[in-house]
Amino acid sequence: MPRITFDSVEKSFGRTRVLPPLDLVLEDGEFTVLVGPSGCGKSTTLRLLAGLETLSGGEIYFDDRPIGRLEPKERDIAMVFQDYALYPHMNIARNMSFALRLDRQPKARIDAEVTRVAEMLNIAHLLDRKPAQLSGGQRQRVAMGRALVRDASTFLFDEPLSNLDAKLRARMRTELAEMRDTIDKNMIYVTHDQVEAMTLGDRIVVMNEGVIQQQGTAEELFADPVNRFVAGFIGSPSMNFLPGRITGDRVAGDGFDLPLPPALARRAEATAGREVEVGIRPSHIVLEGGAPIDLRVIVSEYLGAQSVLVTRCGAAEMRAEIASVDRIPTGQTRTFGVLTDDIMLFDRGTGARL
């Protein structure tokens, strides 16, 4: 399996630049997730790797071999698309074996590979059916199986779960996670869903407007984001942001005045009066303890064991995550607590974390 390197890769469509020079290294055998909002360049990056788009600049390497000018069939890559793209007139076995038959592989090997992958994906009992006779989740497994039978060095997934309902997506995430642990291949997965990214990725690459904002494990991105974009994108419910100003060892704004933890206060000491945004995770707003903050409860979203409260702090909206047994009436203003050891400060202009 190759080490994949994007070296100053660029892509433009006409006068529109989608990817400025992109540098990225994908390690051998790693499950890498490219995540970001729609239009951030993640699918374009995947299509450039697959050979479905041509490079506007730079080069892509498999180990030390440039592959940017190779045809897709020469890259030893298998891809699972958002659309299942199954042939409706073929049964599942023939859909899955299509690439092997094109490559004129021996029938015994084709049958063995299809059976092996079908059993792994729990679709062996469906091999004689046509795609129209399957559910959405079953069709998605077939699309994955068609890629897996090729035994390619690298597997690409372009938002493969986006057409499924929420319950089926959760189940397929689990199956993909199990597959990741049993298949020793390069796997690159594109999604806009940060829950999928955090569940599946050995490494997560967060993109925005064609630029890599940060990369690392889910834990690193959640606990130590480099800027406001990453902090707001990773985590569910997303981080709250309050406009404020640093005053000595405190930060204050409309409806709040919070002490800074000692380490953050020392770093902020030289920036007194600086305009910032205060980042507070919903799970760091508590009913007892912490620094006091008055919030007016607008909506209570019951989610089972947890409830998410939509509240107002001055003119800003905030979310708090509490246990559902602690019922807070809507329309009520009450004092909550902020766990200030966990707050983050971001520059109001650049979005960089202080």
Image (cartoon, rainbow, N blue to C red):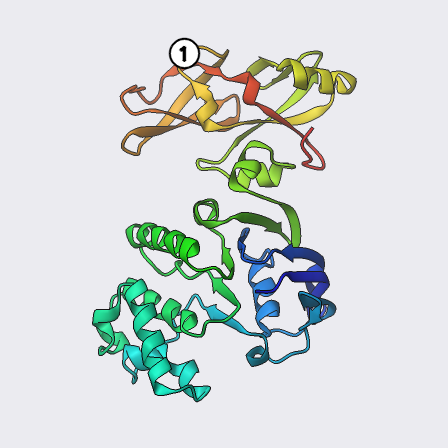
Looking at the picture, tell me which residue is in the foreground, 228 or 243: 228
Asked if residue 96 lies left or right of residue 245, the reply is left
Q: Quadrant of the N terminus?
A: bottom right
Rendered view: 307 above or below 157: above
Q: Quadrant of residue 130?
A: bottom left
Looking at the picture, tell me which residue is in the foreground, 112 or 257: 112
Query: In terms of secondary structure, where does tag 1 sit?
Result: loop
Residue that appears at 52% across and 41% down: 218
Q: Is residue 166 visible?
A: yes
Where in the figure is residue 199, as x and y percent of width and height?
43, 46
Residue that appears at 48% across and 59% down: 184
Instruction: Please name the residue that numbered disc 1 is placed on.
Output: 288
Asked if residue 292 lies left or right of residue 94, the reply is right
Q: Quadrant of the C terminus?
A: top right
Where in the figure is residue 119, as x and y percent of width and height?
28, 66
Looking at the picture, tell me which residue is in the foreground, 149 or 48: 149
Looking at the picture, tell me which residue is in the foreground, 312 or 272: 272
Rendered view: 195 above or below 270: below
Amino acid marked by disc 1: Glu
